[in-house]
């Protein structure tokens, strides 16, 4: 008699199971993709509307084109200004560089966070132990990024197309499609670059740094290419240069998509290839796993904070110093073009009254203030990660009080912000002196010191949030920072009422060196920052430490 | 009567609520100096919450806690002066080496027996020149263990201290706790490894759903539970229906296995009638006590 033997049921992996990482990546990208799509779209919209509001007559538009279009210093910083006498030309010029940089930074931060960051946290061990390999997992994550980029693109396109319908703007649907594609290109490139550096580097910070270096070199190459006659070919060696060469709305060059597509594809394929050649948690570039102990600075909680912050401090000070030196060098040339009434009007609205190099630097120092404010936000997030990761517990169960831990970190961050502020002043002066712009060292250092109080204010908001809502400390700081930056940059061109501009933190500071620093306002901003930190400190003493 | 400061740990009505959920409810616990006490309970019973409250990392919703007579909430730094801790999660700074981490932990504690630290590094076979990032989970746990033991602190608060250690290193841990006991240090050992608690602890405290349900020595607790009897009779197995306190009866031919609550004499009297060929009476292990106290179902229900 035949006996039927029941074999164990084996469930074949469903398509859903095989794409779990792709869907998870897409889902985790959703919020930031919607946010940045909206920001990109609004940037385009505000640029178009501001132009139609401010530059109403043909003569004003032609003057703007004559002033900025021929200026190589401005081209070096913000890309070539072409057809500024038209709405599309100004819209493309005004929005492209900002969106290109923001998109690239988002792309590299996002992909290193969801790839190497997740691996650092050990969560990929679980994911990759399913019915997949590391190579397939990276491929899936890249698919998730592609979905996120498509969402950013779609939102940017919808807003651009909607704004383009206005009779005063007139940007067609196909031109909107092209513009949205161009604007999202840098994000796509650096999502792939971040995926590649996540395979090369041993931890998220390194992966972000490597991708940041690619971005920095890319920006530098296109800057030199745009600024120096005869070296324009350098633009074609830079990923950001390719995006610039797409020239949306001003004589499109679709052939620039070729190097963009080839580079992105190469980076993505290299990421997939390298993923298959390493262990989960391992890296292609080997890291030294052991070294001699360096105990000299590790004397206690402050020494530890200094050690943990050292690479961040150096990176920020160097970045601000290089940025300051570069704008210092271009200040004389750029400032000489700030003579048109419309440009002066914009500069005046931003607080930098007058013309010349100082007026130009007045606006530049506002941008540097945003940069140092961003530094405050990232460094306070580092402090929060010590609590969230449970590492602060080791100190707080010893002889370190919460007060000492909290004030030690804030003091270290404040000193780091001070160093960046002074570096901004010093190196801008050095750059400006090189071109003989007549900017005095004390005037430049004072302008540097002038950006310190807003950064302290941002730090204060973070410290306050850390006391009451530690999980939202980063979100609170980035919201204050993002809102202030958006209102300041867009509001200056839109020319809306002062009510909107007054909600920007950066509008409260004086635009030194265009005008004399207002130390009283600075003291109020710094005082408010310190007050918020004190309230945050009191709240910290009364709550549980919260890990994540 | 014990003086207040004779207690290494003393809690009165210590309570922690997260919204409406009581993570720890009315904990009254006294641990005398020099005692080694095991702290047991399933996941989510409130063990880690207790330790975080004792260290002032979490604020109590009610009650109070003292370490050597010092209030943990009002004077946390003073309370920590005689304490060293192994936390439940081995989160360390990935960029520091093992040696740097131990140096930092020593600076933070303020007191290190350097000769003993070096001995512990050898005993636990730790390579201190490696970065924490390169350590396995077990090696990170060793760093934390050495960091706590090297301080020779009067009170060691240990939350799952052997998590991730191999059996040889677990043995080294037991040796180290034995040394701590000999030096008169107090050890508060929160653990899931019941054999470890049984081997090391003078007393055991058992938590259930945030409440302390038993405290006592193993001897005292065994009286609360059943003994296991294994017997073989020469004749036919007698009728055991009338025997009081009998449970878990398993009969296979002439062999009997059962648990007896209370006096064992009535069972012996019945068995003697059929002639006893062999008899084994065994006290319950801590694991059996623990499972008897929770029951398989309630244990798993609590885990979820």
Image: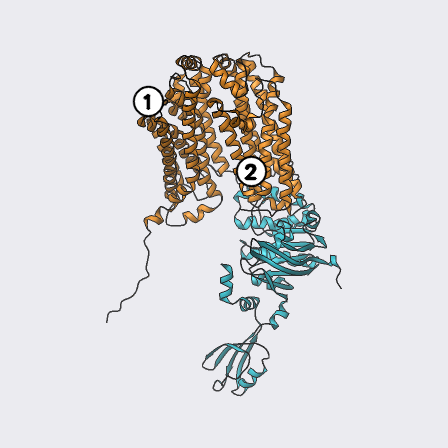
Crowdedness near tag 1: few (<14), some (14–19) or many (≥20) residues, C-alpha within 10 Å: some
Q: Which numbered dot is residue A382? A: 2
**Chain letter matching colour orange:** A
Disc 1: host chain? A
Q: Nearer the viewer, residue A458 or A377?
A: A458
Residue shown at the point (52%, 38%) measured from the top left: A475
Work out which residue is located at the far bottom of the displayed protein and give it.
Answer: B273
Label 1 and label 2: CA atoms lie apart by 42 Å
Tag 2 secondary structure: helix
Q: Which color scheme does this rendered protein use?
A: by chain
Image vertical order of residue A534 relative to residue A428, above or below: below
Left/right placement of residue A45 relative to residue A472 reads left
**Chain letter matching colour cyan:** B
Image vertical order of residue A194 relative to residue B207, above or below: above
Dots 1 and 2: beta carbons under 8 Å? no
Image vertical order of residue A536 relative to residue A358, above or below: below
Q: Position of residue A482 (x, y in %)?
A: 50, 31
Tag 1 secondary structure: loop
- Among the 4 quarters of the image, the one containing residue A462: top right
Left/right placement of residue A253 relative to residue B57 reads left
Q: Return the disc, 1 or 2, that comes first in the chain's sequence.
A: 1
Q: Nearer the viewer, residue A478 or B154?
A: A478
Residue shown at the point (43%, 39%) measured from the top left: A31
The residue where tag 1 is placed is: A253
Q: Position of residue B10 (x, y in %)?
A: 68, 58
């Amino acid at each position: 008699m035949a006996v039927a033997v029941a074999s164990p049921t084996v469930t074949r992996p469903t398509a859903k199971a095989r794409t779990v990482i792709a869907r998870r990546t897409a889902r985790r990208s959703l919020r930031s993709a919607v946010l940045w799509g909206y920001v990109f779209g609004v940037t385009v919209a505000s640029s178009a509307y501001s132009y139609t509001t401010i530059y109403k007559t043909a003569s004003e538009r032609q003057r703007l084109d004559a002033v900025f279009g021929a200026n190589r210093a401005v081209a070096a910083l913000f890309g070539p200004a072409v057809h500024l006498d038209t709405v599309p030309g100004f819209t493309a010029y005004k929005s492209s560089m900002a969106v290109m940089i923001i998109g690239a930074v988002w792309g590299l931060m996002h992909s290193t966070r969801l790839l190497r960051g997740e691996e650092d946290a050990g969560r990929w061990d679980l994911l990759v132990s399913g019915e997949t390999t590391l190579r397939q997992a990276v491929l899936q994550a890249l698919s998730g990024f592609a979905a996120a980029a498509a969402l950013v693109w779609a939102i940017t396109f919808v807003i651009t197309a909607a704004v383009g319908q206005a009779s005063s703007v007139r940007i067609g649907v196909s031109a909107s499609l092209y513009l949205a594609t161009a604007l999202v290109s840098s994000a796509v490139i650096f999502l792939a670059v971040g995926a590649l550096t996540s395979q090369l580097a041993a931890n998220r910070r390194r992966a972000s740094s490597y991708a940041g270096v690619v971005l920095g070199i890319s920006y530098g190459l296109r800057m030199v290419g745009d600024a120096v006659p005869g070296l324009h070919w350098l633009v074609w060696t830079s990923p950001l240069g390719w995006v610039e060469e797409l020239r949306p709305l001003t004589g499109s060059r679709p052939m620039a998509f070729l190097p963009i597509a080839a580079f992105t594809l190469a980076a993505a394929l290299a990421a997939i290839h390298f993923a298959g050649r390493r262990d989960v948690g391992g890296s292609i570039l080997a890291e030294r796993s052991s070294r001699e102990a360096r105990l000299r600075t590790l004397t206690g909680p402050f020494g530890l904070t200094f050690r943990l912050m050292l690479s961040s401090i150096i990176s920020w000070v160097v970045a601000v110093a290089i940025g300051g030196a570069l704008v210092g060098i271009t200040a004389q040339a750029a400032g000489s073009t700030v003579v048109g009434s419309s440009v002066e009007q914009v500069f005046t609205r931003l607080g930098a009254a007058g013309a010349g190099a100082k007026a130009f630097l007045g606006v530049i120092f506002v941008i540097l203030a945003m940069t140092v404010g961003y530094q405050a936000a990232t460094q306070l997030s580092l402090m929060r990660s010590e609590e969230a990761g449970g590492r602060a517990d080791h100190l707080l169960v010893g002889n370190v009080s919460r007060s000492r831990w909290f004030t030690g970190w804030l003091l270290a961050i404040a000193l780091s912000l001070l160093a960046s502020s002074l570096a901004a002043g010093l190196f801008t002066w050095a750059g400006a002196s090189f071109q003989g712009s007549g900017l005095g060292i004390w005037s430049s250092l004072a302008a540097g010191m002038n950006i310190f109080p807003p950064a302290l204010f941002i730090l204060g908001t973070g410290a306050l949030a850390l006391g009451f809502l530690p999980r939202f400390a980063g979100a609170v700081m980035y919201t204050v920072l993002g809102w202030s930056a958006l209102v300041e940059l867009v509001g200056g061109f839109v020319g809306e009422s002062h009510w909107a501009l007054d909600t920007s933190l950066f509008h409260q500071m004086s635009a030194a060196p265009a005008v004399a620093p207002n130390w009283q306002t600075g003291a109020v901003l710094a005082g408010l920052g310190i007050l918020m930190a004190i309230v945050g400190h009191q709240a910290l003493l009364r709550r549980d430490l919260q890990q994540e | 009567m014990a003086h207040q400061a004779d207690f290494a740990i003393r809690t009165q009505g210590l309570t922690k609520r997260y919204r409406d959920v009581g993570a720890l409810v009315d904990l009254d616990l006294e641990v005398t100096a020099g005692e080694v006490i095991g702290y047991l309970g399933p996941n989510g019973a409130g063990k880690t919450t207790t330790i975080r409250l004792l260290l002032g990392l979490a604020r109590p919703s009610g009650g109070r806690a003292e370490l050597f007579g010092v209030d943990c909430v009002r004077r946390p730094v003073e309370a920590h002066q005689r304490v060293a801790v192994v936390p439940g999660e081995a989160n360390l700074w990935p960029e520091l080496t093992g040696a740097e981490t131990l140096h930092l932990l020593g600076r933070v504690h303020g007191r290190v027996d350097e000769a003993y630290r070096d001995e512990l590094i050898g005993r636990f076979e730790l390579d201190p020149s490696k970065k924490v990032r390169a350590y396995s989970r077990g090696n990170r746990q060793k760093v934390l263990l050495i960091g706590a033991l090297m301080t020779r602190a009067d009170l060691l608060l240990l939350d799952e201290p052997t998590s991730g250690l191999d059996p040889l290193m677990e043995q080294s841990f037991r040796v180290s706790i034995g040394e701590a006991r000999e030096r008169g240090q107090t050890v508060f050992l929160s653990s899931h490894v019941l054999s470890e608690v049984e081997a090391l602890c003078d007393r055991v405290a058992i938590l259930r759903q945030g409440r302390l349900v038993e405290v006592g020595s193993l001897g005292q607790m065994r009286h609360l539970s059943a003994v296991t009897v294994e017997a073989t009779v020469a004749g036919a197995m007698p009728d055991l229906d009338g025997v009081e306190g009998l449970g878990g009866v398993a009969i296979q031919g002439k062999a009997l296995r059962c648990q007896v609550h209370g006096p064992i004499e009535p069972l012996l009297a019945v068995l003697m009638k059929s002639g006893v060929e062999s008899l084994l009476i065994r006290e319950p292990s801590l694991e059996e006590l623990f499972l008897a106290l929770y029951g398989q179902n309630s244990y798993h229900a609590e885990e979820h």
